[in-house]
Image (cartoon, rainbow, N blue to C red):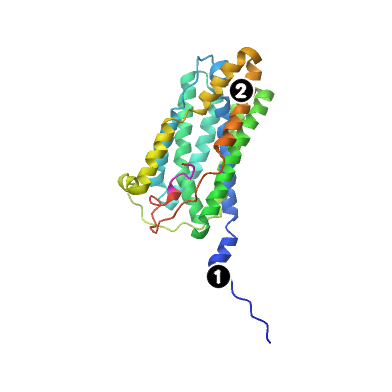
Amino acid sequence: MSPTAPQPVPEHAAADRRWLTPGVAGIGAASCLADVGHEVPTALLPSLLTSTLGAGGAGSDRGRVRRGAARFAGGALADDPARRRTVAVGGYTATAALAAGTGAATSVWQVGALRAEAWAARGLRVPARNALLADIVPASAYGRAYGFERMMDNLGAIAGPLLALGLVAAVGTRWAIGLSVIPGLLAAAAIVYAIRRAPTAEPRPRVPLRIRVRPVLRGDLGRLLAAVAAFEVGNVAATLLILRATELLSPDRGLRAATTVALGMYVAYNVAARRPRQCPPVVPPTGSASADPSSFSPSA
């Protein structure tokens, strides 16, 4: 009896096994490092405003509104493969510089302006990054690839406040915020690494940018977005939570100890908020990035 000849491995199965490519790893590293660079200034913002600049309170991070608008506009930019790569690199670089620049601010309005622009750059890059991730993995592995990227982002959200604790004790608030530019720029380098390992973008004629709202709001997706919007309205800015904890703990523990405890509570908050609760994106049969969930943030 002759031995059975080995069966050929289906092409899609072979592609599934190699979904964790250098490009996917680069995007995951970019998400992790960028969140570290974002969380350090976020965790130390109340201390900068109250202790360093002498402000009476912290703003509510209205720059998040700019992030939402920029993310929506970024979806249209991400439809173009060439634009999405430029926007991704520029967004990561601008976010790093603007967020770290708050450490050199001398007034509250400067902090607010820099934070708002950093949020806008952060929002603009997200659809481009997600579309880029869809470019470099097979459709059958989207769930694993996006799950890996979200895992790395969540690791950065936890590591950032922990790094802030060590930096503020070693070099003070301003320098700690300024040094956050390092992981931010490393994130930009990681996204460049991922782009260089992505397939060559197919040339296509430039078309006018179009932002379509009505198709997004129809059907089940519109109801889901309404629920997300209701949640975000009641989602208190993390800086206010840190500030309130610091104010309550300062009379008994002193400002330095209160700040340390408040940052530790913020780490616990991030651990609880980032627990697994997301579904992989569903890819529709169209080829447009504006209809592709990769144009939107999986964190929603």
The correct choice, above or below, for 2 with respect to 271 in the image is: below
As for residue 141 lying within the magenta part, the answer is no
Q: Local crowd at mark 1 within 10 Å, few (<14), some, or many (≥20)?
A: few
Q: Is residue 189 visible in this depiction of the protein?
A: no
Sequence-first disc among 2 and 1:
1
The correct choice, above or below, for 112 with respect to 251 in the image is: below
Q: CA distance from mark 2 to mark 1?
A: 55 Å
Left or right of 66 on screen, residue 259: right
Foreground residue among 240 and 106: 240
The correct choice, above or below, for 110 with respect to 95 in the image is: above
Foreground residue among 258 and 183: 258
Q: Which residue is mark 1?
A: 10
Farthest residue in the left direction? 214
Question: Residue 230: x and y, percent?
Answer: 40, 35
Q: Which residue is mark 2?
A: 173
- For the point 54% across and 28% down, the residue is 101
Which secondary structure, mark 1? loop
